[in-house]
Amino acid sequence: MKIGLDVFLEKYTQDYKGKRIGLVTNMTGVNQRLTPTIDLFHEHPDLQLTALYGPEHGIRGDAKEGEKVESSVDPYTNVPVYSLYGASKKPSKEMLDPVDVVFFDLQDIGARYYTYIYTMAYMMETCAEYGKQFVVLDRPNPISGAAVEGNFVEEAHRSFVGLYPIPNRHGLTVGEMALLYKHEFGIDCDLAVIPMEGWNRELYYDETGLFWVPPSPNTTGIDMAVLYPGTCLVEGTNLSEGRGTTRPFEYVGAPFIDGYRLARAFNGKMLPGVLARAVSFMPTYQKHKDTVCEGVQLHVTDRRALHSLRTGLTLLELIAEMYPNDFHFVFYEPTQRYMFNLLSGTDRLQNYILNGEGNVFLEQCEKHAEAFKIQRKPYLLY
């Protein structure tokens, strides 16, 4: 197979000769031999790279989640780098003045909480506003494009971890998502998508022959990515989601949990595609830093059978039932909002979890997922 970057370099560079090019990318922007897109554009005789744009975690991926990143100059190419995760998440007119066309080459991980797809949306909006073309160099959805899970984000709970009404696991590539933004959500920019060649919707990333480059510090591999549409919800609680360990989003625990008891209870649910193992861990940063936690590691036994959202909700329900006086959802004082509601896209899921009614919510999710499959169908490229 060939990613959009390699297809573009083989077939389309002449179309952009003489144009000033901006590039939204980071360390995941590499070709199939791991040469950075930045270098390939900067050194290409027909391409004039005049600006770089960095998403969350920065252009080189060295910033932690949520950490603001300053604009700078790339030390390797001397091209200015404009941060899209600093004072503002939406580019200004001044940021686009040096370019005629903006290319997007970032590896997404297939879950709606991941901010790169909203960096893309904001850049598309600004390109529409100031008459710049926007080109997506398509890349695989690492957890396949077949499965869809979850609910639509409600209007009152939209944010930079859920900006549009899409499910938790959307099953789209970034190119397909851009087409959805344009035709369903009204971002009417001059859009071009350079599709991949040889990718199909059933493939997981480790079946493509591509090297895995972590899109952010805690995206450690395919098992983590498969679990993430469900276990990311743990971020909105007082439980550790494993940040600051070697297995983020696979480890879930807290100082008040008995890991052996939790693992037995979880495995007793007989969920397809996953098993829990009792673990003890000490996060090096974030929640429960330098404190021993017990909990579980979730092990994926069959990625195609696993339902990540059901897995995450089942685990949260069990912990809420077993530790009602210790478990809680985190209220963020500066914004006067529950992070959990932004991640889940609704204020109803908290009560479903506390009342042991996650199945009711999942039944509603099935309707949303089926509706989204119909909505997205005209924009599927593979």
Image (cartoon, rainbow, N blue to C red):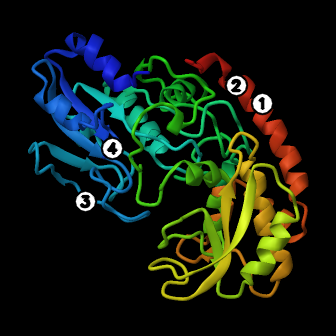
Q: CA distance from mark 1 to mark 4?
A: 32 Å
Vertical placement of 215 versus 330: above or below? Answer: above
Mark closest to the chain's N terminus, 3 or 2: 3
Circle 4 packing at 10 Å, graded few (<14), some (14-19), many (20+), is many
Instruction: Tell me residue 184's x, y (percent).
Output: 61, 26
Vertical placement of 168 versus 171: above or below? Answer: below
Mark closest to the chain's N terminus, 1 or 4: 4
Task: Judge by depth and name the residue closer to the eye, 345 or 381.
Answer: 381
Task: Judge by depth and name the residue closer to the eye, 360 or 334.
Answer: 360
Q: Amino acid at mark 1?
A: Ala
Residue 106, image quadrant: top left
User: In this rendering, would 178 be left or right of 234?
Assistant: left
Q: Which residue is mark 1?
A: 371
Task: Judge by depth and name the residue closer to the eye, 189 or 199.
Answer: 199
Provide the secondary structure element on which disc 2 rests: helix
Q: Which residue is mark 3?
A: 70
Mark closest to the chain's N terminus, 4 or 2: 4
Q: CA distance from mark 2 to mark 1?
A: 6 Å
Q: Which residue is mark 2?
A: 375
Q: CA distance from mark 1 to mark 3?
A: 40 Å
